[in-house]
Amino acid sequence: MSAIWTDLAPYLALVLVGYLPNEVWRVFGLVLARGLNEDSEIVVWSRAVATAILAGVIAKLIVFSSGALAGIPLGVRVSAAACGFLGYLTMKRSAFAGVLVGEAALLLGGWLVVR
């Protein structure tokens, strides 16, 4: 029985320390935002801030890559992001399609550069 707890302890710690504290705030946000109008200024502002933060994170990942992604040239990474955005726009604003197109472009570009 002790060996099972030893193997599961890191996962339990992840759930208790990583997942649950964040989930409380998500639920609190859902409850708090239940009666808000989607066109209200606060909702539009918070959506704009969230979009700007996401754009900043994506730009940081593209420009200042680390790990295996750093081995792919900057031009390939920027081109893959542009292809993903075009895929998003052309396929009825589907985030899933944009991610698939961008990932395919990144893999193809990385494969062509390595060859």
Image (tube, grey):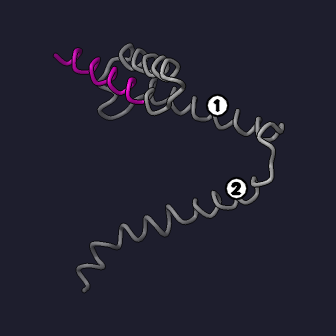
Determine whether the residue tagged by mark 1 lies in a helix, strand or loop. helix
How many marks the image carries: the answer is 2
Q: Is residue 109 magenta?
A: yes
**Residue at the spot of label 1:** 52
- Image quadrant for the N terminus? bottom left
- Residue 9 in percent (x, y) is at 35, 73
Q: Is tag 1's residue or tag 2's residue first in the polypeptide sequence? A: 2
Disc 2 residue type (three-letter): Gly
The residue at 28%/24% (across/down) is 107
**Residue at the spot of label 2:** 29
Crowding at mark 2 (Cα within 10 Å: few <14, some 14-19, many 20+): few
Residue furthest front in the image: 92
Determine whether the residue tagged by mark 2 lies in a helix, strand or loop. helix
The residue at 51%/26% (across/down) is 59
- Residue 65 in percent (x, y) is at 40, 29
* Residue 20 figure quarter: bottom right
Residue furthest left in the image: 115
- Residue 75 in percent (x, y) is at 38, 13
- Residue 36 in percent (x, y) is at 80, 48
The residue at 37%/33% (across/down) is 66
Is residue 77 found left or right of 19 in the rendered image? left
Q: Which residues are magenta?
A: 99-115
Quote the CA–CA distance across marks 1 and 2.
19 Å
- Image quadrant for the C terminus? top left
Q: Is residue 114 magenta?
A: yes
